[in-house]
Amino acid sequence: MASYHESGSNNRYVVLENGELYPTLYSTYDAARAAVLHKHADTLEEQRAECAEWNGVMSSKVDVEENRETGTTTLYVEKEIYITIQRYAVSFS
């Protein structure tokens, strides 16, 4: 099992959305999560507006801290969009 290293290390992150890999390799969890938030910005803003209007709870779960123990963090965007951000410790030669 790969170990977790702090920022500035050789960790890289991939984003998988409903089985489809994003075409970018990210150097931080925050960058990977930001890519998800950017891609789904319209849907998330619509949900926030609806929740504010009806005092409801958003069904999307995107404000999620990185799971530093396993390296696998799961996010959810309404409308059956399941996202996994996976951390890999890599070495360069």
Image: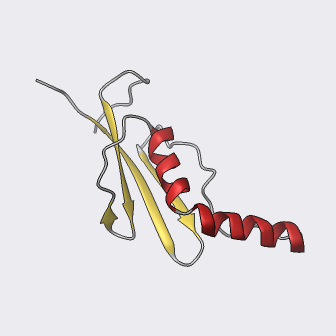
Whole-percent x, y for residue 71 in the image: 40, 43
The residue sitting at 56% across, 78% down in the picture is 79
Q: Quadrant of residue 17?
A: bottom left
Which image quadrant: the N terminus?
top left
Residue 2 drawn above or below residue 5: below
The residue sitting at 52% across, 42% down in the picture is 66
Coloring applied to the structure = secondary structure
For the residue pair 67 and 83, the one nearer the viewer reads as 83
Q: Quadrant of residue 41?
A: bottom right
Q: Quadrant of residue 28?
A: top left
Instruction: Indicate left or right for 79 with 55 as reference.
Output: left
Residue positioned most to the front: 42
The residue sitting at 38% across, 30% down in the picture is 4
Residue 88 drawn above or below residue 74: above
Which image quadrant: the C terminus?
top left
The residue sitting at 49% across, 55% down in the picture is 36
For the residue pair 11 and 69, the one nearer the viewer reads as 11
Whole-percent x, y for residue 10 in the image: 29, 27
Residue 25 drawn above or below residue 38: above
Whole-percent x, y for residue 84 in the image: 42, 57
